[in-house]
Amino acid sequence: MNTFLYAALGFTLATVVAWGGLLVWAFIFLDRHDSYWDHAPGAAETFFVCWLLSGIVAAFIAAWMSRTRRSS
């Protein structure tokens, strides 16, 4: 159960970083009435793929860290 909790927290952390970075970038560089994804539809797919991959990697690393922490 502890491993699952760490994995969920790792995925959540990666999600906050990815979406937070996207929102900060949008606030800085986009007009509030504009949508980057309307101008570059491939950007949406790229973002979602990178977000999911980083979330999976973060979940795996967090689960691995929970197991190594327990064995120490």
Image (tube, rainbow, N blue to C red):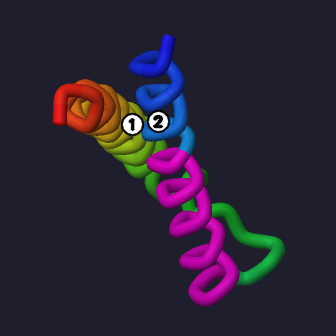
**In the visual, does 66 lie left or right of 29?**
left
The question of residue 12 being in magenta is answered with no
Q: Position of residue 50 (x, y in %)?
A: 32, 43
Residue hosting label 1: 55
Q: Is residue 42 above or below residue 18?
A: above
CB-based contact (under 8 Å), mark 1 and mark 2: yes
Q: Residue at x 36, y 31 (%)?
A: 59
Callout 1 secondary element: helix
Q: Residue at x 53, y 37 (%)?
A: 9
Q: Which residues are magenta?
A: 13-30
Separation of marks 1 and 2 at Cα, in angstroms: 5 Å
Q: Position of residue 1 (x, y in %)?
A: 50, 10
Q: Amino acid at mark 2?
A: Phe
Number of other residues with Cα within 10 Å of mark 2, as a class: few under 14, some 14 to 19, many 20 or more: many
Q: Amino acid at mark 1?
A: Gly
Q: Please give the label number shown on residue 64.
A: none
- The front one of 51 and 32 is 51
- The front one of 42 and 71 is 71
Q: Residue at x 32, y 32 (%)?
A: 66
Hey, which quadrant is residue 53 in on the image? top left
User: Magenta region's main secondary structure?
Assistant: helix
Q: Residue at x 82, y 72 (%)?
A: 33
The question of residue 18 being in magenta is answered with yes
Number of disc labels: 2
Residue hosting label 2: 11
